[in-house]
Image (cartoon, helix red, strand yellow):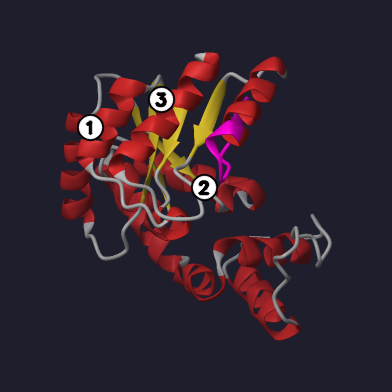
């Protein structure tokens, strides 16, 4: 089990890490989250302090949209030297094509100790990340539509180029869903999908998040039906 332990203060993140370890967590997910954007030294210090608290493997969650901290390859290197980093969860970039993504993943791997995993987030660009050699897709889609996510993943990591092309085509076909996520946020959209499928209540998101308006929920339901995702 992997436990998210991010907090606005190091002391709280350390307490979360200790509680997670006591509960039997196998690893920790940690982002550089705080009230003001952190400096490079502050990021390294955060990971060093939390990593030292339990010794559990840490997944470095690079999430600049939320944290307003833009991690660099140099920062990856420094954090991995200061804490027991097992994997890095990198943000996808919609502006990068497949070649640019492959080059970026190569630079990140070179900045990390051998054997450190690299996972991609951002569902719309996850296929490009897997095709570029990422080890994992940290998926929002997979929590509600696991068969769709699993099929994309299997094809994208296959050695057969025909299957990899099928993953590209399937990703392009899902563009209406990606567009909804870009417009409204992936959590709100997948909550609407889950409600349409009878997996959750319409008002299932934790406050302060609110569900999509009725019209947008209807649009999500139409997309799911048209794409055959239900």
Of labels 1 and 2, the one closer to you: 1
Of labels 3 and 1, the one closer to you: 3
Q: How far apart in space, not on screen, are marks 3 and 1 (Cα)?
A: 20 Å
Q: How far apart in space, not on screen, are marks 3 and 2 (Cα)?
A: 27 Å
How many residues crowd around disc 1 within 10 Å: few (fewer than 14), some, or many (20 or more)?
many
Front-most of 75 and 117? Answer: 75
The C terminus lies in quadrant: bottom right
Provide residue 130's location: percent of width, then percent of height. 34, 43
> In the rendered image, which residue does mark 3 sit on?
48
Provide residue 176's location: percent of width, then percent of height. 50, 74
Please give the name of the residue rendered at 64% of the width and 73% of the height, measured from the top-left corner: 220
Pointer 3 or 1: first along the chain: 3
Provide residue 193's location: percent of width, then percent of height. 68, 64
Q: Which residues are magenta?
A: 1-11
Q: Secondary structure at mark 2?
A: loop
Provide residue 6's location: percent of width, then percent of height. 56, 40
Q: Against 203, is 60 above or below?
A: above
> In the rendered image, which residue does mark 1 sit on?
109
Please give the name of the residue rendered at 52% of the width and 34% of the height, measured from the top-left corner: 29
Please give the name of the residue rendered at 63% of the width and 47% of the height, measured from the top-left corner: 143
Pointer 3 or 2: first along the chain: 3
Please give the name of the residue rendered at 45% of the width and 53% of the height, measured from the top-left corner: 67
Question: Within the image, what quadrant is residue 222 found in?
Answer: bottom right
The answer to whether residue 149 is seen in the rendering is: yes
- Check residue 184 in the rendering and tell me which mark sits there, or answer none: none
> In the rendered image, which residue does mark 2 sit on?
139
């Amino acid at each position: 089990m992997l436990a998210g332990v991010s907090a606005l203060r190091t002391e709280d993140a350390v307490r979360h890490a200790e509680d997670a370890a006591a509960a039997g967590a196998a690893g920790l997910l940690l982002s550089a989250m705080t009230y003001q954007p952190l400096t490079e030294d502050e990021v390294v210090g955060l990971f060093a302090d939390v990593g030292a608290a339990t010794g559990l493997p840490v997944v470095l969650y690079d999430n600049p949209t939320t944290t307003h901290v833009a991690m660099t390859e140099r920062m990856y290197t420094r954090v991995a030297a200061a804490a027991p980093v097992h994997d890095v969860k990198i943000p996808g970039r919609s502006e990068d094509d497949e070649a640019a993504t492959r080059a970026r993943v190569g630079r990140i791997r070179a900045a990390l100790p051998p054997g450190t995993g690299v996972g991609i987030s951002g569902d719309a660009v996850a296929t490009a990340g897997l095709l570029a050699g990422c080890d994992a897709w940290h998926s929002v889609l997979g929590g509600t539509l696991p068969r769709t996510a699993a099929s994309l993943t299997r094809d994208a990591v296959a050695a057969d180029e025909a299957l990899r092309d099928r993953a590209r085509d399937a990703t392009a076909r899902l563009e209406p869903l990606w567009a909804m996520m870009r417009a409204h946020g992936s959590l709100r959209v997948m909550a609407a999908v889950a409600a349409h499928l009878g997996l959750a209540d319409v008002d299932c998101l934790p406050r302060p998040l609110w569900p999509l308006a009725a019209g947008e929920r209807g649009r999500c339901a139409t997309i799911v039906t048209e794409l055959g995702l239900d």
